[in-house]
Image (cartoon, rainbow, N blue to C red):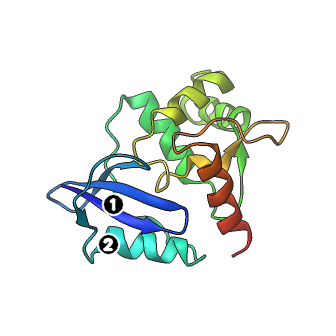
Amino acid sequence: MNYYYDSPAGRLYVDINADGAVTGLKNSGEGSEKLPPGDARQWLDCYFSGKNPGKTAVLCDGDERNRRVWELISEIPYGETSTYGCLAEKYLLRWGERLSPRTVGMICGKNPVWLMVPCHRVIMADGSLGGYAGGPEMKRTLLRIEVSA
C-alpha cells in the first residue's frame, strides 16, 4: 500500500506491505492516503522529532551483497557517520570479500528504504556528503536532525 507522510524535510511516500514492513521510501511519487498510525508512522514521528527511533520493520529486496552492505549501514549509530571506504573494510573483515568504496556507494544508491537503513550516515572520506537516493538536500537535512538531537 502506498501512503504519504508530511515530514519537516518534505512529503515522503511510504510503501508498506501487508505485514506492516516498509518496502520503499521516496520523496516524490504517489500516495493518496496519509500514513495511518502504526509502527512506520511512530518511527517517522520519533525520528523527525529529533530522537533515535531505533529499528523498524523493513523489507529490502536485493541480492546477498546488497543486504550485507545495508546490514553494515544499519549498524552506524544514530548521530554518527561512517565512510564508504570504512564500510568496504568492514565488509572485507566480516565476509572476506573485497568491495571498493565506489561499490558500497552504488549499493547505497539501491537502498529502497534510505532513511530506515540510514545511508545518509555514509559520507566520503574527505568529509563531503557524496550521493544519496533521497537527494543531497535531504541528506543534509537528516544529518542536521541527528546532530542537533
Crowding around mark 2 (Cα neighbors within 10 Å: few <14, some 14 to 19, many 20+) is: some
The circle drawn on residue 79 is none
Query: Against 110, is 97 above or below?
Result: above
Crowding around mark 1 (Cα neighbors within 10 Å: few <14, some 14 to 19, many 20+) is: some
| Residue to which mark 2 is pinned | 39
Which residue is painted at 53% across and 36% down in the image? 108
Secondary structure under tag 2 reads helix
| Residue to which mark 1 is pinned | 57
The amino acid type, in three-letter code, at marker 2 is: Asp
Query: Against 137, is 18 above or below?
Result: below
Expressed as whole percent of the image width and height from the top left, the position of residue 82 reads 71, 47
Indicate the quadrant where residue 33 lies. bottom left
Expressed as whole percent of the image width and height from the top left, the position of residue 20 reads 22, 62
Q: Could you tell me if the residues under marks 2 and 1 are in contact, i.e. CB atoms within 8 Å? A: yes
Indicate the quadrant where residue 72 lies. top right
The amino acid type, in three-letter code, at marker 1 is: Ala
Residue 139 visible in the current orientation: yes
Q: Is residue 39 left or right of residue 1?
A: right
Going from N to C along the chain, the mark reached first, 2 or 1, is: 2
Which residue is painted at 45% across and 64% down in the image? 55
Expressed as whole percent of the image width and height from the top left, the position of residue 56 reads 39, 64
Which residue is painted at 68% across and 59% down in the image? 143
